[in-house]
Amino acid sequence: MRIGVIGLGLIGGSFALAIRRAHPSAVVVGTDRDEAAIDAALQRGVVDAAATLPELGACDALMIAVPVRQMPELFARLSSHLQSNCVVTDAGSTKGAVIEAARTTFGAHVAQFVPGHPIAGRERSGVGAAAGELFEARHVVLTPLEENDPAAIDRVEQLWQSCGARVVRLEAGEHDRVFAAVSHLPHIIAFALVDELAARPNARQLFTFAASGFRDFTRIAGSSPDMWRDIALDNGAALAEECRRIEERLAALRRAIEARDGETLHTAMQRARAAREHWMAGELAGFRDDAA
Amino acid sequence: MRIGVIGLGLIGGSFALAIRRAHPSAVVVGTDRDEAAIDAALQRGVVDAAATLPELGACDALMIAVPVRQMPELFARLSSHLQSNCVVTDAGSTKGAVIEAARTTFGAHVAQFVPGHPIAGRERSGVGAAAGELFEARHVVLTPLEENDPAAIDRVEQLWQSCGARVVRLEAGEHDRVFAAVSHLPHIIAFALVDELAARPNARQLFTFAASGFRDFTRIAGSSPDMWRDIALDNGAALAEECRRIEERLAALRRAIEARDGETLHTAMQRARAAREHWMAGELAGFRDDAA
């Protein structure tokens, strides 16, 4: 089995390591637009060898783990090299725009492309932070296309399962709306808060007294601006809608503060704490569930 | 030396333990409106004995560590028992309303009351979570009053320093504006986000895919609704102003998303990440500083 990886960062590198661990006889090859990442991946033994796009398009399976806004151009360069036995998947955090690009570029080959999104990460990025166990017990969401060959979907699912991941399937639009709410919106808020405070005349004083609550709340504001600008643009419709909703919810709490309405504040806080406690305990049975 | 503590929760209990460690010959007595907290404090050796308000008002120093909205009533009950040699301080997260209550209630005794706010906490609350090292290397903000006897301020400062804390002084209004921004606002946002998502028809699906970024971002939504309703009401003016500002900043980022303005998004994200990195590294020299 020959596995290709395009994009030797944290996710691509970790996928390569996990595959090598699960399939010792597999040959894993890869590339990156950054030569230094290729060198580092070779040196760390993340991949067996560097490979060209024609070589990658001839693999049995190909993982594309580049920032989402780079995918359309990459798809265009890859398309003519894609052999019909090569199952392709990706690791993009948004799915709608990636799928649109794949449909436009791959033509009939789109049947081989099974979009995916591993829900895993760590504070550090780059191939130096890659770890073969990154996906263990983590969700990987696949958003299969109508055009997909069922065997291709199964193949991608099996590869992720061999990395220890729990694979679930969602419709692509649903995926993008869910992650706008639970991931993309919190990132936007964290960036917004830190930027707001850092711009103040008394910024130094504010950051002097910021403590552990602030540190955890803003941890995701340490994420890559390149990656998150791309996600915000790619998933713009769903994310803008989430921003509007939280603006409204915040304004409602502000009005309760202004009206000295302690009961409204307490009720919202109590509901939030209870929900979070259930979630942390893995107890999701009490949550509303008309998604299906 | 005889030290009293009213409110044997996380902060009061930790203060008692820290004082006992720093001053082995001191006698530490305390009370709580919850009998079970007194029993637990005695059993854990947090205090030497329970004490009545007359006994507490006759201590050399008295720490009041009850929720801020309970302070006015407590001050009223304590006032007639307060001996003139007893230096009083508190641990409230807001200062303006507490000071107003102290001025109203204590009369001339207000010279003995040095308001304070230790910047320390942990996820668990209650005397069971108390720890003598909680304040080590943490900031404690004192907001002395014009009426204060300088010796009383020094006394409170020395007590906190003996607990390992770094004492700084701020004007009370400044304290409340600073903490509205770096602490109270993030709490309101975290409560708002969890409450918003838990109320959705597809809440179960959303919480199924919420991951470590969401966990850290919302950690402070696990805080006590009683305490945070009180803080929001007590510091209402400054907090409402912070809510308005972040609503505006969020709306600006939303408009950038809607306009597909990647440069505005990237610039804000990059500024935020850089500011947070400097802060985490303890490098505050680059921040704007016209607070003084």
Image: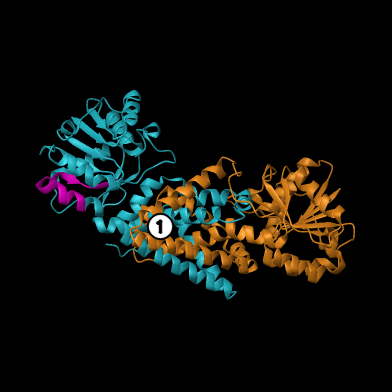
Chain colours: A cyan, B orange
Q: Where in the figure is residue A204, as x and y percent of width and height?
A: 61, 50
Q: Is residue B81 magenta?
A: no
Q: In this rendered view, identify the residue nearer to me: B170 or B78.
A: B170
Q: Chain of mark 1?
A: A
Vertical side of B178 occupied by A45: above or below: above
The magenta region covers: A100-117
State which quarter of the image contains the C terminus of chain B: bottom right
Query: Position of B292 compared to B197: left or right?
Result: right
Residue A32 figure quarter:
top left
Query: Position of B30 compared to A253: left or right?
Result: right
Q: Is residue A114 magenta?
A: yes
Q: Can residue B59 be seen at all in this image of the molecule?
A: no
Secondary structure, magenta segment, majority class: helix
Vertical side of B16 occupied by A286: above or below: below
Q: Where in the figure is residue B280, as x and y percent of width and height?
A: 55, 43
* Residue that sits furthest to the right in the current view: B84
Q: Secondary structure at mark 1?
A: helix
Q: Which residue is disc 1 drawn over?
A: A185
Q: Amino acid at mark 1?
A: Leu
At x 81%, y 66%, the residue is B78
Q: Where in the figure is residue B51, as x and y percent of width and height?
A: 81, 57
Q: Where in the figure is residue A59, as x and y percent of width and height?
A: 17, 33
Query: Position of A212 compared to A62: left or right?
Result: right
Q: In this rendered view, identify the residue nearer to me: B4 or A261.
A: A261
